[in-house]
Amino acid sequence: MQIKDVAKRLHIVLFVGLYILAHCGAQPLRKRSVSEVQLMHNVWEHKHALDRQDWLQMKLGNIHTGSISSAGRPGKGPLLLTPPDSKDLSPEQITLDMNLLDLNSRHSH
């Protein structure tokens, strides 16, 4: 008879414990003031902005601009990104430009 009594008490304790957890566990200990809610919102926005900046910097870090400078070409301006009409170039100029492009590609690797 004693075992049934202990089992019955254990069931009652478990039932009361589950009831308290279900109805009281989801509620905060106290209500937050408006300033606390605003502060938490501001912190979340700041963290979100930092995450976006980090993501953007990571994406921009993978971009190669392919800029061409006049380094290694003393006394000359920057290289043109669009070549002039090939009819205006002499064979020597074409050879010189091809060699320059070959040199630039070797230095970039």
Image (cartoon, rainbow, N blue to C red):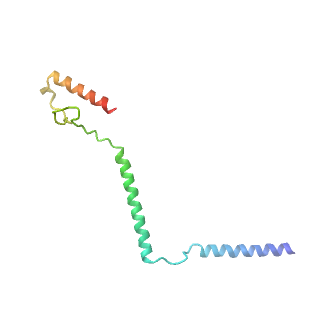
Which residue is the extreme one toward the right?
A: 1
Of the pair 1 and 36, the residue shown nearer to us: 36
Which residue is the extreme one toward the front?
A: 74
Is the C terminus in the top left, top right, bottom left or bottom right quadrant? Answer: top left
Residue at image coords 79%, 75%: 8
Position of 47 with respect to 28 (left or right) is left
Of the pair 103 and 18, the residue shown nearer to us: 103
Residue at image coords 33%, 43%: 63
Residue at image coords 64%, 76%: 20
Tell me residue 27's x, y (percent). 55, 75
Which quadrant holds residue 76?
top left
Which quadrant holds residue 77?
top left
Above-or-below relation of 77 to 30: above
Is the N terminus in the top left, top right, bottom left or bottom right quadrant? Answer: bottom right
Of the pair 1 and 107, the residue shown nearer to us: 107
Position of 72 with respect to 64 (left or right) is left
Residue at image coords 27%, 28%: 103
Which residue is the extreme one toward the left?
A: 88
Q: How many marks?
A: 0
Of the pair 71 and 41, the residue shown nearer to us: 71
Position of 6 with respect to 35 (left or right) is right
Tell me residue 33's x, y (percent). 45, 78
Position of 58 with respect to 4 (left or right) is left
Which quadrant holds residue 4?
bottom right
Tell me residue 86's x, y (percent). 16, 27
